[in-house]
Image (tube, helix red, strand yellow):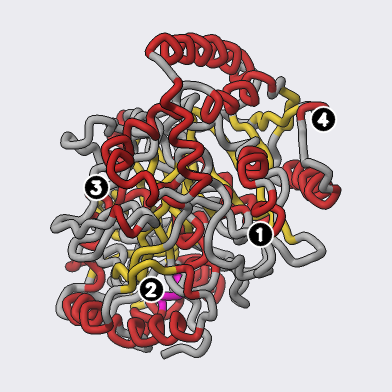
Amino acid sequence: MPSALSLDFAALRAAYAAGTLTPTALVGEILGRIEAHANPAVWIHLLPRAELLAHARRLESLDRTALPLYGVPFAIKDNLDLAGAPTTAACPAFAYTPTVSAAIVQRLIAAGAIPVGKTNLDQFATGLVGVPRNPFNSAVIPGGSSSGSAVAVAAGLVSFSLGTDTAGSGRVPAGLNNLVGLKPTKGALSTRGVVPACRSLDCVSIFALTCADAAAVQRIAEAFDPLDAFSRARSALPAFPPGLRVGVPAARDLEFFGDPEAAKLFSDSLTRLTALGVQPVEIDFAPFRETAALLYQGPWIAERWAALRAFHQGHADAFLPVTRQIVEAARSLGAADTFEGFYRLAALARRAAAEWEKMDVLLLPTAPRPYTVAEVAAEPLLLNSRLGTYTNFVNLLDLSALAVPAGLRRDGVPWGVTFIAPAWRDFDLLALGARWHANLGGNLGATSTSLPSGPGSVPVVASGDGCIRLAVVGAHLTGLPLNHQLTERHARLVWTGTTAPVYRFYALPNTTPPKPGLVRVAGDGAAIALEVWELSTAAFGSFVAAVPPPLCIGTLTLSTGESVKGFLCEPAALVGAEDITRFGGWRAYRAQAT
């Protein structure tokens, strides 16, 4: 096993492909790390060693290249069901043991991921504070409610984790743990098998070390679920326009509650925007701020009461005092209050829509500032409310959001920002976030591993409506002789990376301009550098019509496990061809050839 193994997806794929790691060995490594990690409050339930090894051995009997999450360990917030493991929502009296996993958990396990255990949270996911110790500073809160899920990833105990997000629970812990936290579009990920907080607003969220990893999980997890009344089918959108407009609140609308370090880090973030080639624009934050207030001061608190009312009737004393105070506040609300809340939200959404006319993406602090455990214990409701200053409005307004690291304070505690966009911009945000994260650099979570760079570090952007993704490996690469056949069809480059390690690569004889041939093999394959471009359906058709033999368009498997259309070669054409697989790509081969 590699020493100091990083659990980011690229590192795991490389180790599995090289034969230096097996799922069985990974399980041993993970359990050793968990045992050595002096933060027991991360976990509510760990799967027994025997069960984890059974998962590992099952994977070792399967084709690794057919499973996009092969041997990737993950954690599950303990308000999502995992078959055979108790679900408690951090309330022992509420515990039950499901026989079926949550829909999203089923999808991830089927893709080869290994569930390690259930993680701690603010009781019934009501709060943004968190339970375990922050791995950067034990005196500082880790953020909640998905605290255990975030800490498990930041501490290098798992590769990714599932949380939930209603008010910011999938973003605030990311900001305070130096992680990527994706709050997908409402309904993109099934909530079947999730203990509800506010059913109309709840989202399953993803914590990961990189945006590319979060994107890989999102692609596998996302699916319309007809058994979930709140599930929605993806709406394809055109790509972000050139000259991306990033909205930023006016200085008078920014609140850091007396923390000059947070204010400086946000100022530094605005400077960093210019390195991304985007256009900052000032917007009025008032409608977003006023919407945020509705979540706990309006009738949506009644949804929490609706979710827990039956349990409360016989177990009121099982609630923590703060949770009980929040939930029981809903009993004073009537139906008229609910309708007035809906009317108020509609008015604020109309005002917010006017601000969206000015911008494509909104940039905000993830949380105004970190707080210590002692500070929160002294004023739990006030500081919990402050932590949601920049998060509470997102689900109410049906927006997607991505929390990303933005630097460390002088005391070593992370601080983050969040990119926010309209619904179904999840993958666009992940691509933008990856560029941001690469520009920032630094380590992954609380580990000593540096952020990976290079091919594959930026996730593939999902295809727009009526578009097809095409992988190119040779003369159609950027700057090479045939690239114009893509650009003149208005194709756009959406990803740079490699294939899965299942191909051999050849320099074909007697081709003008020189061209390579890519062939999938049953064994002794390698990863080959490529670019993924996106074309309209009509442009793709005309492009394919011009592809000369012996080349053809087939289906390629990327290093992420995804499949896209791409160039392959007829095996008969390999007679007299030079095997150039060792170069890892066409550019590297051509560089030595000239």
**Above or below, comparing residue 592 to residue 216 in the picture:** below
Query: What's the residue type where badge 1 is placed?
Result: Val
Task: Examine the residues drawn in magenta and state their main secondary structure.
Answer: helix
Which residue was labeled with disc 1? 373
- On residue 251, the disc is 4
Q: Nearer the viewer, mark 3 or mark 2?
A: 3
Q: Is residue 11 magenta?
A: yes
Left or right of residue 391: residue 137: right
- On residue 193, the disc is 3
Q: Nearer the viewer, mark 3 or mark 1?
A: 1
Q: Residues within 10 Å of mark 3 (few under 14, many from 20)?
A: some
Q: Residue at x 71, y 62 (%)?
A: 413
Q: Position of residue 557 (x, y in %)?
A: 29, 60
Task: For marks 2 and 4, give the CA distance.
Answer: 44 Å
Q: Residue at x 49, y 66 (%)?
A: 153
Q: Nearer the viewer, mark 4 or mark 3?
A: 3
The secondary element bearing badge 1 is classed as helix
Query: What's the residue type where badge 2 is placed?
Result: Arg
